[in-house]
Amino acid sequence: QVQLVESGGGLVQAGGSLRLSCAASGSIFSINVMGWYRQAPGKQRELVATITSAKGTNYADSVKGRFTISRDNAKNTVSLQMNSLKPEDTAVYYCNVRNVRNGAYVGDYWGQGTQVTVSS
């Protein structure tokens, strides 16, 4: 099992910045993908950004150039720096970890979510 603890959400004005952090513990494989997803009211959960244990990154088009995902493999933490925030970024943000073995996901773990609210 993997436990994820998120922090850093809150209320910010449009154009402002927030930094989300997630600490993972438990059965984390050396090869894994960590990421952030978000879910706005009435909408499906969507990808924000992912980062592999080799530091390869992937971003949703809507956040490219504004958000930066990073990780510390030694500490099993993943962070999301969010700049130039827009009201449409308002959502509950979830940390995610997927263990990888032989090229396949063998676990999919989620944090409890942290609210990000961007006021106009």
Image (cartoon, rainbow, N blue to C red):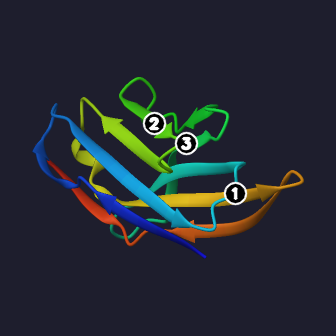
- The type of residue carrying mark 3 is Asn
Left or right for 65, reference 41: right
Q: Are marks 2 and 1 in contact (CB under 8 Å)?
A: no
> Tag 1's secondary structure?
loop
Q: Which residue is mark 3?
A: 73
What is the number of callouts on the image?
A: 3
- The type of residue carrying mark 2 is Ile
> Tag 2's secondary structure?
strand
Q: Which residue is mark 1?
A: 29
Nearer to the camera, 42 or 45: 45
Q: Which residue is mark 2?
A: 69
Q: Are marks 3 and 2 in contact (CB under 8 Å)?
A: no
- The type of residue carrying mark 1 is Phe
Q: Are marks 3 and 1 in contact (CB under 8 Å)?
A: no
Residue at 27% x, 42% y is: 19
Q: Nearer the viewer, mark 2 or mark 1?
A: 1
Please state the horizontal and vertical placement of residue 21, each as a whole percent of the image. 34, 50
Please state the horizontal and vertical placement of residue 79, each as a whole percent of the image. 39, 43
Looking at the rendered structure, which numbered label has been put on residue 8?
A: none
Q: Earlier in the sequence, mark 2 or mark 1?
A: 1
The 10 Å Cα crowd at callout 2, few under 14, some 14 to 19, many 20 or more, is: many
84 lies above or below 117: above
